[in-house]
Image (cartoon, rainbow, N blue to C red):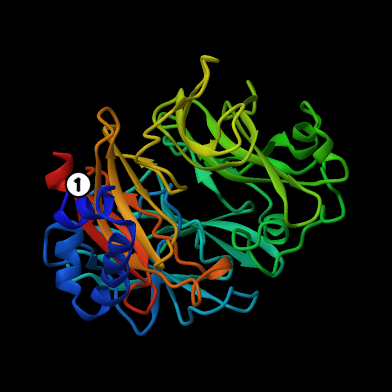
Amino acid sequence: MTIYRKMIRCTWIPWRIRHRLETWVEKGCYHKYPKLYQWLHFGRFTPIPLPLTKGPKHHFFGYYDKSPWNSSDRYILAHEADFNDRPPNAEDKVTIGIIDTFDNNRFFPLSESHAWNWQQGSMLQWHPLDPEYLVIYNDREKDRFIGIVRNINDGEVRIYENPFYALLPDGTIGFSLNFSRLARHRPGYGYAGGYDKFSSEQAPDRDGIWAVDIQTGKSELIVSLAQLANVNPKPSMRQAWHYINHIQPSKNGGRIAFFHVWHQDDKKWKVRLYSCRPDGTELTCLLDTGFISHYDWKDDEHILVWANRPGATYPCFLILDHSGSPPKPFAEKLLQEDGHCSFSPDGNWILNDTYPDIYQKRTLMLVHRETEQRIDLARLHSPKSRWWGEIRCDLHPRWNHSGTSICIDSVHEGTRQMYTVDVSKWVK
């Protein structure tokens, strides 16, 4: 910990002095003396996030639950957009491409998509069956969303009738949901321009999570919204609209987790965290405490999640497991706000970030799982006056496959771009 950080935390120093020092560092020093700012916060003079892309166009990957690197860590997936100041509409397209780290980080366009948002892009990801050369993303044909598999070498394309949210690690099954419904009930996560034939139904029995056979393309509804709405119904579910979000397979593919969300007035929503087998069996409610946010699987049995703990009215990070044992708080003193958490490939480290604080800065950090040691990597300016709501630019930190580097999206230099951070000296 640097001298500056120790001073800010020293209770014997008058609060007024500590507050003035912090205000000057965050508001004045950050912009006028960036090297001094880095030294005060991190004990080094240069920032460690290295630009991966550059303007004038905007570049981003998307969510934190997928790695943008291919299996050899040479190519990094990216979206390229012409604008950065509003949500995309049905006419807006985004360019799908790869960044070649062996060729001065040159961006190579592959295709375009009309099914995207700022939070999760087009669900761009490497195909588990060939994570070196096959990519998956979503697109739109007229008012119907579809899934695309494209070979980056020869351009060969296969089209699926269902858009993809996630795939099992072995690449045999993909999972889909209603992105039109998501666009209506959770703006910023669905896609514009689609038709929802269940838009008038609050909990349709023919909509929910679809499992898509990657080989045949056939899909099957494995969990319906009506099914979820009838599990231990609460008063808040009466006349409520139900939808599903954030599907994520476990590390070995034995289960998937997802959010069941409902709301009555487009403002106050409730959520449950569920898991089930890839075929929808063994449906289990893992957490039902009203507020549940970002999560990540450690393995096939344990999940780290930011949520209200049972019997409490405030959130913290919790470790859940399928044994039925009570949730266990994790790093309560170090992690006191929501973030996009993910386990390193070896499971020893947790990558996390924050939302903008009172100084409009996001903090990027590592936390050791066993010792709960926290290492702050960067503080990056993200003014909510320009980027918030549907167009916010969360860091969404993602690991490479060897667990030595991370990739983030950020606007701290004025445009939406991608950056990498070498963390090998901390995680070795």
For the residue labelled by badge 1, is the local secondary structure a helix, a strand or a loop?
Answer: loop
> In x, y percent, where is residue 258?
59, 38
> In x, y percent, where is residue 319?
45, 28
The answer to which image quadrant residue 180 occupies is bottom right
Decide: is 402 above or below 416: above
Q: Can residue 225 be seen in this view?
A: yes
> To which residue does mark 1 refer?
404
Q: Along the line of sight, which residue is nearer the eye, 280 or 146? A: 280
Q: Along the line of sight, which residue is nearer the eye, 5 or 66? A: 5
Label 1 environment density (alpha carbons within 10 Å; few <14, some 14–19, many ≥20)? some
Q: Quadrant where the C terminus lies?
A: top left
Question: Image check: 290 left or right of 306?
Answer: right
Q: Residue at x 56, y 30 (%)?
A: 309
Q: Residue at x 65, y 24 (%)?
A: 283
Question: Image check: 339 left or right of 366?
Answer: right
Amino acid type, callout 1: Thr
